[in-house]
Amino acid sequence: MKLTETNFYQKIVRDPWPYVTGAVLLAILNIALFTATGNPWGVTTPFSYWGAWIWKAIGGHPESWGYFAEGTAHGKALMQQTFLTNGGSIMNLGIVIGALFATLAASQFKIKKIKNIRQVIAAVLGGLAMGYGARIAFGCNVGAFFSGVASFSLHGWIYTIFIFVGAWIGSKLLVKYLM
């Protein structure tokens, strides 16, 4: 079968990729990132920097918090870096923009109507719980699961167990209260 421009677009951009292809590509990207930076892939730590930079911009003093104390890696990031000089921030921005372009290219972008206030409350509470959980678990599904398990870190394996427990509880709550 000859691969034409239309077939290429359909196969690579529009159709979903097999899970194995996605897994292999993500593994290669994680290895490349670790090789280039010395750090595994993570997403949530730059979000803590964003909050601290915003708080500092409006007059707060996050450098007085233990997490951002002078002499720590986080304190250095807070004091010497900005959104545009922090590699994690740029990577997060790239993930969001890349996901938007991929969704647009596959003609899958949709703005959904909010059904009711319960849906909003569930989304806000779920987001807060996920954000809090991501910080105490040393990362989200990328940093804690993907990079944690790959590096045989105990926290990654514990995270794996509890992500399944949380998904089970969340699905039960979703069915009971929102469907």
Image: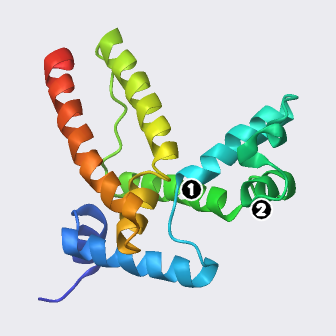
Give the numbered dot on residue 138.
none
The image quadrant of residue 154 is bottom left
Between the C-alphas of marks 2 and 1, the distance is 13 Å
Q: Nearer the viewer, residue 150 or 41?
A: 150
Q: Quadrant of residue 170?
A: top left
Res. 114 visible in picture? no
Q: Is residue 123 above or below residue 28?
A: above
Q: Label 2: state its secondary structure.
A: loop
Q: Amino acid at mark 2?
A: Thr
Task: State which quarter of the image contains the N terminus.
Answer: bottom left
Picture disc at residue 92:
1
Determine whether the residue tagged by mark 1 lies in a helix, strand or loop.
helix
**In the picture provided, is 57 more to the left or to the right than 164?**
right
Which residue is the extreme one toward the bottom?
A: 2
Label 1: how many Cα within 10 Å (few below 14, some 14–19, many 20+): some
Residue, disc 2: 85
Residue at figure coordinates x 48%, y 53% from the top left: 139
Q: Position of residue 96 (x, y in %)?
A: 51, 52
In the picture, which quadrant includes the C terminus? top left
Residue in view at x 54 percent, y 50 percent: 44
Q: Residues within 10 Å of mark 2 (few under 14, many from 20)?
A: few
